[in-house]
Image (tube, helix red, strand yellow):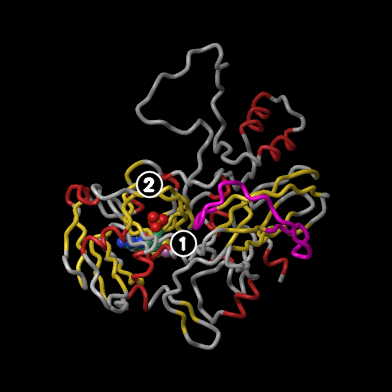
Amino acid sequence: MPNRDRPGLSRRAWLAAATGTAASGLALTRLDALKAAPFQEAPPQLPDPTRVPGRFVSELGRRATGEQPRRLLRTLALSSSSRTPLHELQGTITPSDLHFERHHAGVPEILAEDHELLVHGMVDRPMVFRMADLRRYPQASRICFIECSGNGGGAYSRSRMPTSITAQQLDGLLSTSEWTGVMLSTILREVGVRPGASWILAEGRDAAVMARSVPLDKAMDDAMLAYGQNGEAIRPEQGYPVRLLLPGWEGNAMVKWLRRIEVSDRPTMTRDETSRYTDPLKDGTARQFSFVMDAKSVITFPSYPYVLPERGWWEIEGLAWTGRGRITQVEVSTDGGRSWTAAALQQPVLPKSTVRFRHLWNWDGRETVILSRATDETGYVQPTVQQLWDARGEGTSYHHNHQRAWKVAADGTVTFGLGDLL
Ligand SMILES: Nc1nc2c(c(=O)[nH]1)N[C@H]1C(S)=C(S)[C@@H](COP(=O)(O)O)O[C@H]1N2
Ligand SMILES: [Mo]
């Protein structure tokens, strides 16, 4: 995480300061703000690597000295979350140890050998699956994002728009992995779903006993029982030994530490889908089972707390994603939303996954606000915050997919800029 007290205080700046070589220390400092993860303390003086033997093999790899991306933690009584450092990552896959976390009652300690998944209800053959059983079914892998539907709430309030907020603080409840497991449809065919069934209930084996109802259509479509993440066993924080994966849907419904699936002919109306995870609308009613994550994008560079050291060519980059399929276009505005240009989409553009976009920008050194706007294959366009305010009721706390903005000041400092547009 960049040093926020001294944004951009970098290895080169440290060296410059330590050796007293650079009169232009400030410029170096700012330039190095581009490469995140500056040292929190003075870095060690490293010997010339061509003159000393390197370190030998190790059983576990580690990050380079000086690369220290970290999740950002928040704990409220039993409930906790941590956020992915979006502004420090590259490509689209989130390293597993930086995948965001959201636990309603902590991470349970579970041994795979002890774990059982009961599948019952409106089925011909109720069954208990152990992990070894699940692994004998045909395996599937797919890359997709998981996003908490509360993500982005930090920039939705009509009365309080932040300025000093990082992309991690704002949108870090979003991560992307390659997930491996067995298609839920395979398991449901094994137990034989009875005619008339239309929903399933998924229940977790944590102290929250998180339970959510999911329409059978989704369960039979692309839902997975995931036991692998980025090539290894799924992490405890992500639901070890098995979680429900619902590509493109809100994170909350992807029940972790999955212990029970009950097939039924109606939603169960659990606490998690009645008191929470519903969206108040303008007409005073509430929207329930708003599962799909709408198209969204965020610029991760330049973003707070980066500093642009000089005018000229800079590559704006960020992430876009949609739960409805593929992102077809991301437009970038560098003049506060007056004009828009299509950004380049970095391949591969996978459905229900994050896409990295890039846009080369010749900054003239004047204060401006930059924004991004995503469109998906259904034609849905990421709305403005005003459009969301107009559609939603008071107290809405989920699905904040409105356009984000960053203000670039004449001195190159970058702050969250949505408030400057209102
Ligand atoms: N059993 C259980 N499943 C759960 C939760 C939980 O607290 N318990 N949190 C949910 C929420 S709110 C989200 S956003 C996602 C987060 O998944 P992650 O922690 O792997 O990022 O898991 C969901 N599944
Ligand atoms: Mo969530």
Kindly state the secondary structure of the residue where label 1 is placed: loop
Give whichever of discs 1 and 2 has the lower sequence position: 2
Residue at the far top: name it. 51
SS majority, magenta: loop
Q: Amino acid at mark 1?
A: Gly
Q: Residues within 10 Å of mark 2 (few under 14, many from 20)?
A: many
Q: Can residue 76 be seen at all in this image of the molecule?
A: no
Ligand 1 within 8 Å of disc 1? The answer is no
Percent across and percent down for residue 338 are 78, 65
The picture quadrant for ligand 2 comes to: bottom left
Percent across and percent down for residue 223 are 37, 60
Instruction: Give the residue displayed 47% in from the left and 68% down from the top.
Output: 292
Instruction: Give the residue displayed 79% in from the left and 52% down from the top.
Output: 410
The answer for how far apart the CA atoms under marks 1 and 2 are is 17 Å
Percent across and percent down for residue 5 are 61, 47
Residue extent of the magenta highlight: 331-354
Disc 2: which residue: 229
Question: Does residue 359 show up magenta in the picture?
Answer: no
Q: Can residue 47 be seen at all in this image of the molecule?
A: yes
Ligand 1 within 8 Å of disc 2? The answer is no
From the viewer's side, name the closer residue of 292 and 384: 292
- Rendered-image quadrant of the N terminus: top right
Disc 1: which residue: 248
Percent across and percent down for residue 194 are 23, 73
Task: From the viewer's perspective, tell me whether residue 245 is left or right of residue 385.
Answer: left
270 versus 333 height, above or below: below
